[in-house]
Amino acid sequence: MNATARKKANENAETMLSVEHVSLSFGGVKAIRNVSFDIRKGEIRAIIGPNGAGKTSMLNVINGFYHPQEGTITFKGEKRSDMRPHIAATQGIARTFQNVALFKGMTTLDNIMSGRTLRMKRNMFWQALYFGPARREELEHREYVEEVIDFLEIQHIRRQPVGKLPYGLQKRVELGRALAMEPDLLLLDEPMAGMNLEEKEDMSRFVIDVSEEFGTTVALIEHDMGVVMDLSDRVVVLDHGVLIADGTPDEVQSNQDVIDAYLGISH
């Protein structure tokens, strides 16, 4: 899909998630102050801003790690004052983390399989026996995981412990675990942090393919403005917990408030 067609499709897309007047404080520190924005189905939505702007706090509010003192989150038509992590996961929200959060002693395959846990129906008794229905179920989930491994082009590391992998490949494995959940909304917290140019190009390609081939809605935090402007359909800009801009990449990078607070360049 070319950029023009993608833009038109996103303009007509329904709202998947809506953040309305959300405020979050930790004691006297106001991490988020009266922030509202939405995420449309099928789009790549970027959340940017300087360090301490409240970006990760916002992702934590969306998937239930933090509970805001004010405001509401509406996901797939259901409004709630806060989300719970297990509810977010069962309803179709998956995420990766700023610092890689994998089971370092487990293989790539086993880490990605852990993303299928919520979709397994057999109880622990059947899983312990690994017989009959439980075995058939695991083989079915294993087939989907193998598809994710092929998609991310990591067949060559499928049996390797992830703790021994280079950082860029660990980030790819973490993306694979999130994709194994078959999410409707994928939250990516700095997916390209610490990567070299080649690794960033690969990850950017995977993010686009996740959106276009899987039909997954993506919200990402990223500091590389080249990546943000190339990938995203719309951009939210936060500064000290306050929303200062919301629009297309072109609109945002020409916004004087964004230039003053974050980009630090003149136009």
Image (cartoon, grey):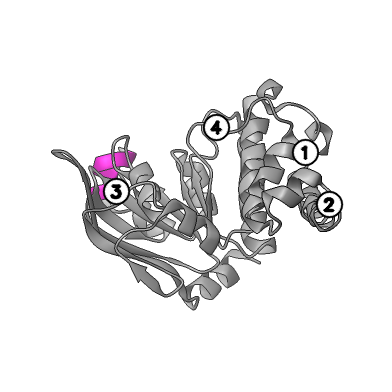
Q: Residue at x 70, y 30 (%)?
A: 106
Which one is earlier in the sequence, the residue at label 3 or at label 4?
4
Tell me the residue that label 2 is attached to.
Answer: 135
Image position, residue 90 (x, y; %): 54, 60
Residue 154: which numbered mark, if any? 1
What is the crowding at mark 3: few (fewer than 14 residues within 10 Å), some, or many (at least 20)?
Answer: many
Which amino acid, by three-letter code, is at mark 4? Val
Which amino acid, by three-letter code, is at mark 1? Ile
Q: In the picture, residue 92 is in which quadrant?
A: bottom right
| Residue 265 in sight from this viewpoint | no
Image position, residue 95 (x, y; %): 52, 48
Look at the numbered disc 1 and give the secondary structure of its residue: loop
* Separation (CA) of disc 1 from disc 2: 25 Å
- Residue span colored magenta: 257-263
Which amino acid, by three-letter code, is at mark 2? Arg
Which amino acid, by three-letter code, is at mark 3? Leu
* Separation (CA) of disc 3 from disc 4: 24 Å
Tell me the residue that label 4 is attached to.
Answer: 100
Q: Are marks 3 and 4 in contact (CB under 8 Å)?
A: no
Q: In the picture, residue 215 is in which quadrant?
A: bottom right
Which one is earlier in the sequence, the residue at label 3 or at label 2?
2
